[in-house]
Image (tube, grey):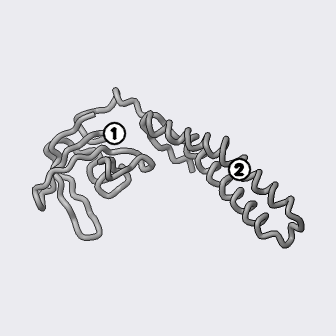
Amino acid sequence: MSDVSYYTKEGLKKLKDELNHLKDIERPKASNAIGEARDKGDLSENAEYDAAKEAQGMLEMKISKLEAVLSNARLIDESQLDLSKVLVLSKVTIKNLNNQMQLNYTLVAESEADLKSGKISVSSPIGKGLLGKKIGEIAEVTVPSGTLKFEIISIER
């Protein structure tokens, strides 16, 4: 189940920083919480101890998942991107043919998606519809409310 994911340098650094924070700061906090709860007496009836152990288990699961994501992460070489078609990291200007509105998006990995800053995931319906399209082509995207048609206006890096 090795799902390779592609990241920008910024996105990869963010993942590594989060993992380091969990390991170096959150993990010792969880251990201290367990130790403090253990010092309060009988463990069989100690809800604080049980909660601290459960929190530690959740933290370790999160660390494990993040390590798995990082082990399958690949850095995208932006200089090698083909500008003739829409790919990951393409900055694309599209026109919604239903209302003639122009939109600008950057296609990114799912973990880097942020609609407020114009970054959409390549695995989103619009992202999937745009991938591989060239300037002038029409992308038909099926969304819950129907089918949208977008014309590719420009592609940049």
Q: Quadrant of residue 96?
A: bottom left
For badge 1, the amino acid type reads Leu
Task: List x then y, in percent, for residue 144.
Answer: 29, 69
For label 2, count other residues whose C-alpha is less than 10 Å away and answer few (under 14), some (14-19) or many (20+): some
Horizontal relation, residue 39 to residue 127: left or right: right
Q: Quadrant of residue 35?
A: bottom right
Q: Comparing marks 2 and 1, which lies closer to the viewer?
A: 2
Residue in the picture at 28% in, 65% down: 143
Viewer-nearest residue: 84 or 90: 90
Residue extending furthest right? 42
Residue extending furthest top? 79
Q: Which mark is residue 89?
A: 1
For label 1, count other residues whose C-alpha is less than 10 Å away and answer few (under 14), some (14-19) or many (20+): many
Residue in the picture at 32% in, 47% down: 117
134 shown above or below 45: above
Horizontal relation, residue 39 to residue 14: left or right: right
Count of labels in the image: 2
Residue in the picture at 15% in, 44% down: 153
Looking at the rendered structure, the secondary structure element under dot 2 is helix
| Nearer-N-terminus badge (2/1) | 2
- Per the model, the C-alpha gap separating discs 2 and 1 is 37 Å
106 shown above or below 62: above
Q: Which mark is residue 29?
A: 2
Quadrant where the C terminus sits is top left
For badge 2, the amino acid type reads Lys
Horizontal relation, residue 66 to residue 54: left or right: left
